[in-house]
Amino acid sequence: MNGGAGPGQGYHSAMTRGTSPDHDAPAVPLADGGSPPAAGLADGGQLPPVDSSAGHRFGITGSLRAHAARGTLINTAFLVALSGLGLVRSFVLAALLTRADYGLWGVLAVSIGTLVWLKDVGIGDKYIQQDEEDQEAAFQKAFTLELMLTSGMVVLLAASLPLFALIYDLPELIAPGLVVLVILLAAVLQTPLWVFYRRMQFVRQRMLQAVDPIVATVVSIGLAVAGAGYWALILGPVVGACAAAAAAVWFAPFKLRLRYEKGTLRTYASFSWPLFVASGATVVIAQGAVLTTEGHLGLAAAGAIALASTITSFTDRVDHLISGALYPAICAVKDRTALLQESFVKSNRLALMWAVPFGVGLTLFCSDLVQFGIGEQWRPAVEVLQVYGVSAAISHIGFNWDAYFRARGDTRPMAVASVAAMFTFLATGIPLLFLYGLRGFAVGVALQGLVHLSFRIHYLRRLFPGFDFARHALRALAPAVPALLAVLVLRAVEPGDRTLGLALGELAFFMGIAAAATWYLESGLLREAVGYVSGRRPAQAGA
């Protein structure tokens, strides 16, 4: 969830995190100027155009609004498709592999992947934020720091693998762990994507990024069909990362060379140390979750947590779609609070149009997913999936807050929120795991997410005085309510036996009502977004 990250998230996302500063995400219509009272912006207040020179120092020519709006369609088209591909890959592999295979993968994810979050100290984000005169030199300094940090992490992890194997009593962790370290080195070679991202050249950035998941999916499924077991979960992402690295180097706009200047480390460190603390809290949560689950309930239970985290992380990717690629534009106007508030509210509303129905739908239909999809071996994961679904829906309210604090160079709030979430999980999640098994663990994760959300609300109100977070949250949840109630009424009058046709009919009914309710409540905002992309700027923003 969003107390840093949910326990057990896949190692591939952990290992590549930070190689693309947007964390797999795009843009929305960015308000273009003016400084009216911030409180009215959530209700569709329209701002006059901003001088396009605001983006020139970022290599962005033309209107920031136009770049952001077009980026919405480009990034959404690419990343929804690729995120969907990843989701399908998860389902296919879950059907082809055993829970023990997934369990070993989950342990490896925590043993190696989550430690890599310590490396995600915002070097890419800081590179996007800077506005030095010599941009090639700025990139090369950031690349040098990333290489130094990654090389140290690879050595540390390689030396730690025998210890992880001893802790979990799984000597088979060592060989795949060494192979997985290749992803880290390949990720450094993908840093040229930062340049395209900073310039908001989304088509080129996304086409190069697409190499990784496409290759990984083909290789993973092929190996699983061939009977490779958990190696299918490992070799696919490794091959995908290497292919993407080769493509990024080939099309790099700047030469990859080592460059270090006095003061560079200090500049980046002041931005990065709170992110290091936040990442450390994430590591503690993930390590504690999988270590206690595997030790108390067994490897198969750890596999259930890994599957739940993989599925719900799909909502994270789509939310990041909306907020992340907006980051260069946010950096360009980071001192204009009114603009930031409008872009925050609208970008989060666009993201929640997807995240809330997905989370609620997962809770409603996860039993059908097990029965008619991935197989009864995953029945113990149903309660975890149900709680994770609700938690994913609620915790995505204000999910994109960190992009705004990073853009302003204020990264301390992320550290405070993550540490608070960590203590909440340690105090509730692990004790509940021992008392009530996976059900108790899921409740602990939900509580962790709620604590993180409360800190998020506190800091957002400080950044945006007068922001009505309660109204924003209720508006986000509203479209899913009639769809949820309609399905529950249907189930009350349906015959007792579930069939695949009945489940699919309910799902279509749920999606149709959720879509209709979303259009009723958010049609103005959707028209506004389409208007910016098509060049027909609407006269008034949608409420």
Image (tube, rainbow, N blue to C red):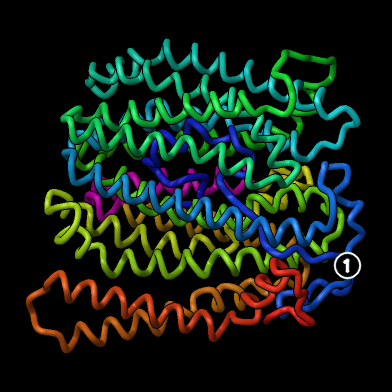
Query: Relative to residue 134, is residue 89 depicted above or below?
Result: below
In the image, residue 248 above or below residue 437:
above
Residue beneath the point at 83% across and 15% down: 261
Q: State the residue in front, 472 or 526.
A: 526
Most common SS among magenta residues: helix
Q: Left or right: where does residue 433 sit relative to residue 464?
A: left
Rendered view: 272 above or below 49? above
SS class, disc 1: loop
Image: 190 above or below 474? above
Give the farthest residue toward the left: 497
Left or right of 433 in this view: 492: left
User: Is residue 519 toward the left or the right of residue 229 in the image?
Assistant: right
Q: Is residue 103 left or right of residue 141?
A: left
Q: Residue at x 67, y 62 (%)?
A: 28
Query: x and y percent of residue 259 in the render?
Result: 77, 14
> Which quarter of the rendering shows the C terminus?
bottom right
Observer-nearest residue: 128 or 336?
128
Q: Position of residue 393 (x, y in %)?
A: 45, 64
Quarter of the image for residue 447 reads bottom left
Residue shown at 17%/76% (left/top)? 502
Name the kind of residue labelled 1 in the image: Pro
Crowding near pointer 1: few (<14 within 10 Å), some, many (20+)? Answer: few
Q: Position of residue 112 (x, y in %)?
A: 41, 26
Whether residue 415 appears in magenta in the rendering, the answer is yes
**Region in magenta:** 414-441
Q: Residue at x 79, y 82 (%)?
A: 539
